[in-house]
Image (cartoon, helix red, strand yellow):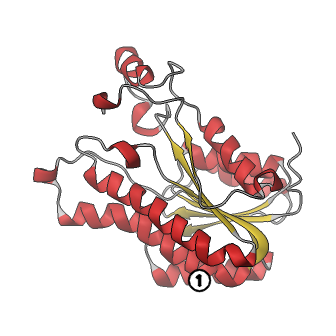
């Protein structure tokens, strides 16, 4: 489906996970020039090759996503190479298990700085590059609304993303800039990829559709929000979770 995104310019900030790949490949397929800022040390060679092979000015740059100076330098590079941007996707995140009694301040800060502080810093820095009609999309998680044992730091960061985006949607709406959130459910990648069939079955049971999601299904919602099909959608959080049920299991 042609979403009429050809020749638009996008900044994607992430940490080299499968969802980054799905989002960027989807944008490239739509003819979007992509600037990919990825957490240092997480580069995926096939994805970097895809950006180069697009031959439309797409490029990648390593970034410490919680470093204000590096973010400013990255945005300056985007400004020089792209001029302005119409799409921004923020997918920087870190997840690990730590019950509250064992949760260190260092882990708390790293989690919030990677997911939430970086969203604030990047969004603030790109404001001068945004065109009227631009679309900002942040990736949260369905866990932000329901919580999960041992993930208080992760869910706090993801819930903060929702509050932040709802507020700036009101600030930027008068400029015609849309701000939305995608909240994935259980996606069969990352730390879940190595689960046993029995463990995967337990996670799949949480969804009404009876299976885990795929990165491409989350990316499809990102593409929708980036396009004019979502021209009157802002301040929204769209769950992509297969109809999560069995909440108590979290």
Residue 188 visible in the displayed image: yes
> Where 184 sits versus 161, above or below?
above
Look at the numbered disc 1 and give the secondary structure of its residue: helix
Q: In the image, is 58 to the left or to the right of 189? A: right
Pick the front one: 57 or 229: 229
The residue at 84%/49% (across/down) is: 30
Q: In the image, is 111 to the left or to the right of 117? A: left
The residue at 68%/73% (across/down) is: 173
The residue at 17%/47% (across/down) is: 99
Work out which quarter of the rendered image holds the N terminus and state it.
top right
Q: Position of residue 121 (x, y in %)?
A: 50, 77
Q: In the image, is 127 to the left or to the right of 57? A: left
The residue at 59%/38% (across/down) is: 215
Pick the front one: 108 or 54: 108
Pick the front one: 79 or 153: 153
Q: Position of residue 17 (x, y in %)?
A: 53, 47
Question: Within the image, what quadrant is residue 132 found in?
Answer: bottom right
The crowd level at tag 1 (other Cα within 10 Å; few <14, some 14-19, many 20+) is: few
Residue 64 visible in the displayed image: no
> Where 36 sits versus 3, above or below?
below
Question: Within the image, what quadrant is residue 78 found in?
Answer: bottom right
> Where 106 sits versus 204, above or below?
below
> Where 245 sits versus 105, above or below?
above
View extreme (left): residue:
101
Which residue has dot 1 on it? 73
């Amino acid at each position: 489906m042609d979403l009429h995104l050809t020749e638009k310019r996008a900044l994607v900030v992430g940490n080299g996970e499968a969802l980054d790949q799905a989002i960027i490949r989807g944008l490239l397929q739509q003819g979007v020039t992509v600037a990919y800022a990825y957490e240092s040390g997480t580069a995926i060679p096939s994805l970097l090759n895809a950006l180069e092979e697009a031959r439309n000015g797409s490029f990648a740059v390593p970034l410490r996503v919680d470093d204000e100076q590096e973010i400013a330098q990255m945005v300056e590079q985007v400004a020089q190479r792209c001029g302005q941007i119409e799409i921004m996707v923020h997918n920087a995140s870190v997840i690990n298990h730590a019950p509250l009694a064992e949760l260190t301040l260092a882990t708390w800060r790293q989690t919030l700085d990677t997911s939430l502080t970086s969203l604030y810093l990047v969004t603030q820095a790109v404001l001068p590059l945004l065109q009227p009609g631009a679309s900002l999309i942040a990736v949260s998680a369905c866990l932000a609304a329901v919580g999960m044992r041992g993930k208080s730091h992760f869910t706090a960061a993801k819930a903060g993303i929702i509050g932040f985006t709802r507020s700036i949607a009101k600030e930027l709406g008068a400029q015609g800039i849309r701000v939305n959130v995608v909240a994935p459910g259980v996606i069969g990648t990352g730390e879940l990829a190595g689960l046993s069939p029995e463990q995967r079955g337990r996670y799949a049971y949480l969804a009404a559709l009876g299976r885990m999601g795929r990165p491409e299904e989350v990316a499809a919602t990102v593409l929708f929000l980036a396009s004019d099909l979502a021209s009157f959608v802002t301040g929204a959080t769209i769950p992509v979770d297969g109809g999560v049920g069995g909440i108590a299991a979290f």
